[in-house]
Amino acid sequence: MVNSWEDRFFNTVTFIILLLCGAAVVFPLLYVVSVSITPISEVLKNGGFILIPRHITLAAYHKLLTDSGIPRALGVTAYITIVGTVLNIIVTALMAYPLSRRKLPGRSIILMMVVFTLLFNGGIIPTYLVVKSVGLLNSLWSLILPNLVWSFNILIVKSFFEQLPEELFESARMDGAKEFRVLWQIALPLSVPVILTVSLFYAVGHWNEFFQAIMYVTDRSFFPLQVIVREILIQTQQPLENAENLTPTETLQMASVVMASLPIILVYPFMQKHFTKGMLLGSIKG
């Protein structure tokens, strides 16, 4: 089949637009990584801008892993990401499955309440008072429980469950399976794409946790990674004299940004296939 000139023009324009979008994404990442592994003397010679380093040093990463609060903050972030995501998925599935059954009494009212929270929330001060009243301040649970479930993710998983063949559920019930067993042994194994997609949403949210940490946590030992990275980013610049003997703040800043972003960037390619499928199937029905 021979493409017409309109098709070739459309493909060319699309390619150029995608190329520009890709460059807009890759360029800042390349700059941050390059500065983080480049000696400060070379950075200064290039006026603070460098994309391809001639010499490579890992001094900034060594300093972050030995002299700063990065290792402990990394552990805190990993803990709230793993534990929080597992709890998020459990609660989301337990809410989405009943809501996907049309015979659930009061289903429309509960759905209305779920959608209502998408538009309105309790506000910062009331939420803080609730967290304080239940004794969660200065604890890791204050970074997990307030966002235990997201309404948007409930709707995505509910829509996915609704598209599963009803005959499978009826057959299981005729064999004596209760609803929890139907959810665990039938619905969830068939919903891997949407579960992985929602897990990625939750995991990214926990990994980038910042606002709740500065609201609910004052004990530095409970600070997550993003709070420590922020402290590094706002540090005053060190004197530029004796630059050869220093691990400069700029390279530390860039190295901290790389360390905070790299885990999620590495995880995403392995979940991209399921991510696309889960989003498309989960968004067919509203």
Image (cartoon, helix red, strand yellow):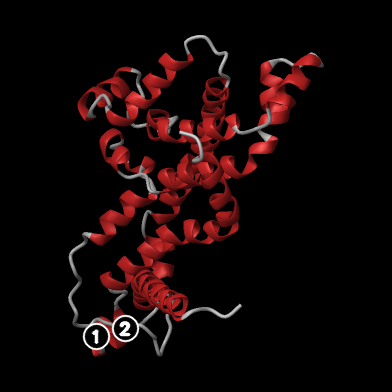
| Residue at image mark 2 | 50
Quadrant where the image shows the N terminus: bottom right
**Toward the viewer: 129 or 248?**
129
In the displayed structure, does residue 3 sit left or right of residue 176?
A: left
Residue type at tag 2:
Ile
**Toward the viewer: 241 or 109?**
109
Residue 213 in the image: above or below residue 274 = above
Measuring from the top left, give residue 133's x and y in whole percent.
30, 17
Q: CA distance from mark 1 to mark 2?
A: 9 Å
Residue 34's quadrant in the figure? bottom left
In the displayed structure, does residue 230 sit left or right of residue 8?
A: left
Q: Residue at x 68, y 30 (%)?
A: 165
Residue 52 in the image: above or below residue 227 = below
Badge nearest the viewer, 1 or 2: 2
Measuring from the top left, give residue 171's x and y in whole percent.
78, 21
| Residue at image mark 1 | 44
Picture disc at residue 285: none
Q: Residue at x 46, y 35 (%)?
A: 153
Residue 61's quadrant in the figure? bottom left
In the displayed structure, does residue 215 sit left or right of residue 107?
A: left
Residue type at tag 1:
Leu
Q: Residue at x 58, y 49 (%)?
A: 277
Return the disc, 1 or 2, that comes first in the chain's sequence.
Answer: 1
Residue 57 in the image: above or below residue 162 = below
Residue 23's quadrant in the figure? bottom left
Measuring from the top left, give residue 90's x and y in whole percent.
56, 29
Q: Secondary structure at mark 1?
A: helix
